[in-house]
Image (tube, rainbow, N blue to C red):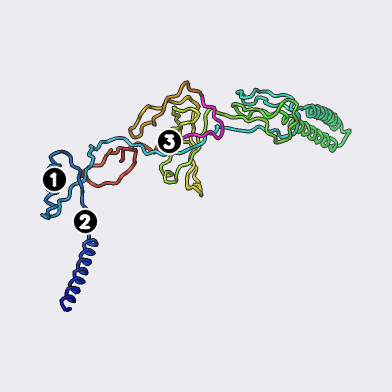
Amino acid sequence: MALRAIHSVVAVVGIAAASAGAWWYQSRPQGPTEVAAPTGPARSGAAAPATAAGGGGAGPAAPRAAGVEVAKAERARLQDDAQSVGTLRSRQSVMLRPEVAGRVREIGFADGATVRKGQVLVQLDDTLQRAEIKQAQAQVSIAQANLKRNQELVAQSFVAQRVLDESNANLQVAEAQLALACARWSRMAILAPFDGTVGIRNVNLGDYVKDGADLVNLEDISSMYADFRLPERFQGKLKPRQSVQLQLDAFPGRMFKATVEAIDPLLDVNGRSVGVRAVLPNTMGEPLAQGGGRPGGPAAGAAAGSPARLSAGPGAPARVAGRGPGHRRAARRRPQRRGRGGTAGCRRSPWVE
């Protein structure tokens, strides 16, 4: 019995010691090890004896270095740019509306035609207004005659000076009524406020339109505005006359150059972005370069067929790539085995500053 008790105690102590050893082995601190991929048959042959020796208990295998890709650092010109989606707008855009109600008597343009400043686009019926002008002209003639007669009578002391003053006032009233009638008559003609291209009219001959009704839109597309927004971190880098490159969905494979004209000083409260407006000349653009790949180079794209002038109206989308304040020298570096530490800058895959 005593021998059996001793065996039980020894078994319990052995199990406890084995458990403590296993816990210590699993929770011990381990340092990082590097593993290198074999580069040739010689290294593979050398690794086999080491593995066999390690398996035989001669000692832990020596840590192996990790495999890396080595490339020479080069100097290249990186461009700190930002990309955004903007909207094309006409340089000037207006919806023509009458100030008074009337019936359309004449339409002086064709849909989509180019018009000049001061050209009559829509003429309303002005019969009543022309009659009022003739009536006012007659009253002016009567007032002028009365004034002239009273001047002669005052010179001969036949009437008092008060009569002459009243005649002069009546003439001024008649002239004011004539000017009012002419102003009413001028409002019956809707003129083009600037040179541009008209859209599609919303009225026809004989239509009765109320004041404020939409007649036709007029767009000045000799040059266009590209409005877009950028994160607020670019606000300190944005300056007027910086170059902007645009790509339009209507003209795939072509690149258009614009210039920053204005920067909104008020940041958007919701998106924390700054508004930028660039001026885009209405030209045919340039074809995109094929397979650029170098930092700061143009984006790759397929060249389009015969180009055409821009005719996009308000709301046309545009992809904007704005250049930063300037170019700077940067090192192109791929991962290397050894080297000095540094701070990464601009990234243009697979390039990094």
Q: Label 1 belongs to which residue?
A: 48
- Asked if residue 312 lies in the magenta stretch, the reply is yes
Considering depth in this image, is 343 or 153 the residue closer to the camera? 343
> Nearer the N terminus, badge 3 or badge 2?
2
Q: Residues within 10 Å of mark 3 (few under 14, many from 20)?
A: many
Single out the residue that lies furthest toward the top.
Answer: 306
Q: Amino acid at mark 3?
A: Ala
Tag on residue 31? 2
Q: Amino acid at mark 2?
A: Gly
Q: Which residues are magenta?
A: 309-319
Tell me how far mark 1 sits from mark 3, CA to CA.
Answer: 56 Å
Compared across the picture, whether 234 is left or right of 205 comes to left
Total numbered circles: 3
Q: Residues within 10 Å of mark 2 (few under 14, many from 20)?
A: few
Judging from the image, what secondary structure is the residue with disc 1 in?
Answer: helix
Q: Quadrant of the C terminus?
A: top left
Residue at image point 82% right, 28% down: 135
Considering depth in this image, is 291 or 134 the residue closer to the camera? 291
> Nearer the N terminus, badge 2 or badge 1?
2
